[in-house]
Image (spheres, grey):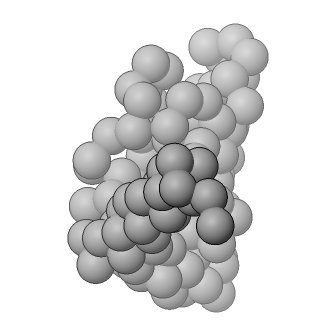
Amino acid sequence: MVVTSIKDLTSTVLLEAISCGLPVICLKNCGLSHVIDDSCGIKILAKTPKQIENDIAANIHKLYNNEDLHHKMATGALKRAEEFSWDKKIVELNSIYTESIIKYYETRYPI
């Protein structure tokens, strides 16, 4: 999967791609850089349009020609997708809410 967006904060297409085990090539900017890590994709630093074009092409060839790397990143994509699952988000949100409530009551009703 190649994502060339420059201003996309965090595209859901990234989550869809990694949940299908697709390695991702994207630009190293905005929310894309948060979702994709070395285990599941390749991030390209955006300097010039020509450099971006060359780096994308080189990395497509790299993944195409290196089956071991492609397999490693496909496996990494599936594992990375788990970190963005709804179950994981629910646990994190519950933790934030619980901590906030505890802090509120501790400051309001000190023991």
Q: What count of labels does the image hold?
A: 0
Residue 40 position in % (x across, y down)? 56, 68
84 over 104 or under it: above or below: below
**Is residue 34 in view?**
yes
Q: Check the picture and name the quadrant holding the N terminus.
A: bottom left
18 vs 35, nearest the viewer: 35
What residue sits 69% from the left and 64% below the top?
A: 38
Q: Check the picture and name the quadrant holding the C terminus.
A: bottom right
**Is residue 61 in view?**
no
What residue sits 48% from the left and 83% below the top?
A: 79
78 vs 65, nearest the viewer: 78
Residue 86 position in % (x across, y down)? 25, 70
Q: Among all residues in the image, which is located at the extreme top?
A: 48
What residue sits 61% from the left and 14% below the top?
A: 49
13 over 91 or under it: above or below: above
16 vs 100, nearest the viewer: 100
55 over 60 or under it: above or below: above
**Side of 17 relative to 32 (left or right):** left
**Image-quadrant location for residue 68:** bottom right
Residue 13 position in % (x across, y down)? 27, 49
**Side of 38 relative to 12 (left or right):** right
**Side of 63 relative to 23 (left or right):** right
69 over 28 or under it: above or below: below
